[in-house]
Image: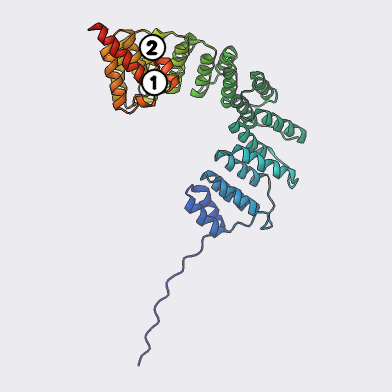
Amino acid sequence: QPVAPLPASQPVAPLPSRSALCGALKQTRNRQSIARLIAELEPQSQKEYTMCIAAWGRAGDWRRAVGLFDTMSDAGVEPNPFSVSAVVSACEKGGQPARALEIFEQARAGDRFESNVVVFNAALAACSRGGEWRRALELLDGMRRQGVAPNERTFGAAISACAKGGAPPERALELLAEMRSSGLRVTQVAVSAAISACGAAGDWKAALFLLDEIRRSGARPDLISWNAALAALDKGRQPRRAVAILDEMAAAGVQPDAVSYNTALLACQRAGEWDSVLELFERVRRAGGKGAPNAFSFNAALAACAATSRAAEAVALLGEMREAGAPPTLRSYAAVISACEAAGEWERALDILREAERAGVAPQLTPAVALQAGLVSLNALESRLLRALGRRT
């Protein structure tokens, strides 16, 4: 009997190279893919561990990034500034600034490597996220003592920490001056953060000076810089200047967004300039796109209607608010009821109260909103409205 030929063997796909696995790790943010690639790679060097830790950071999984970092020494691979930077950044991006700084300090205390600007910048980014401005200034001092030269990112993060942590604005301005004297390019990120620091302290004059400085340098302020200046003007009770900034933005070719308009509306509202609120709201209506009215802007206009007894406008705005896809809030209904009461339109006020109850909003009436609308409680409001109707009839 003839012997049957053996079946042809199927070609075996070659295993991916280590460089191919590393390249794939750089491209993905999918957690399952990252886990598979790391299992195939079995990192062996500082560079490979750093790439794997950074991959978990990009995927937003700070716990796995820390876990992998902790296994490095057990595998006989000592951390270096880049692996420390990767794990610190993973924690910072994952909303864990305190853990990021803890890992940074532990790594430095071990004295197993010499810190560089990369790892300091990762720690400063964590300070920025957590508003740890004093810690940021301490890290800058540590850099100077070690002879590590700060760069643009260093100063940007430190100034941002000052802004978010409520540091005296002088600190941010001093850092900006040091940035210039070091021969570094003053970035818009750094200037915007300094403007925010000035704004948080209500120093709107310094904020506007810095905004002008960007323009004097030949650069064009971005939306973040403009909005930081608007926030400073709001905090400094400068509503008219805030509205003027919106005009300057348009002239500079920068389209205000919802944050821009709402900050200006809030500035006018705080100052009790109700006509300005309503005029500005008309502008928001026409803006469209990212500047289109949202619940905040509608509520600002409703508060203006309540303060000026414009019942019909308030009721119309409530309907427009629903059509715009912004569900009325308790504050919205309270303002409309207040406007109707002020105008003596008791039946309409009672109708709005019933509508709020049907919407499931009114039972959540809080003391703060009740006080704003001149209400004591829902029952008290209803009794007051019914008494007013009885007197009128």
Q: Quick one: SS at disc 1? A: helix
Mark 1 closeness class: few <14, some 14–19, many ≥20 residues within 10 Å: many
Question: Can you name the residue that lies furthest to the right here?
Answer: 145
Q: State the residue position of label 1.
A: 331
Q: Amino acid at mark 1?
A: Arg
Residue 88, percent across and down? 62, 42
Q: Residue at x 69, y 57 (%)?
A: 76
The image position of residue 389, as x and y in percent, is: 26, 10
Q: Nearer the viewer, mark 2 or mark 1?
A: 1
Mark 2 residue crowding within 10 angstroms, few (<14) / some (14–19) / many (20+): many
Q: Which mark is residue 158?
A: none
Residue 70 image point, x, y percent: 64, 51
Image quarter (top left, top right, bottom left or bottom right) of the C terminus: top left
Q: Is residue 135 left or right of residue 350?
A: right
Counting from the top left corner in percent of width and height, residue 117 is at: 68, 37
Which callout, 2 or 1, points at the residue further toward the start of the chain? 2
Please state which of residues 183 and 21 is positioned toward the viewer in this rendering. 21
Q: Is residue 204 above or below residue 328?
A: above
Q: Give the CA distance from mark 2 to mark 1.
A: 12 Å
Q: Is residue 158 above or below residue 36?
A: above
Answer yes or no: is residue 253 visible. no
Numbered label attached to residue 304: 2
- Residue beneath the point at 55% across and 38% down: 95
Question: With respect to residue 252, does 156 lie above or below?
Answer: below
Total marks shown come to 2
Viewer-closest of 371 and 51:
371
Residues at marks 2 and 1 touching, judged by CB atoms closer than 8 Å? no
- In the rendered image, the quadrant that contains the N terminus is bottom left
Closer to us: 51 or 11: 51
Residue occupying image coordinates x 58% and y 42%:
91
Kindly state the secondary structure of the residue where label 2 is placed. helix
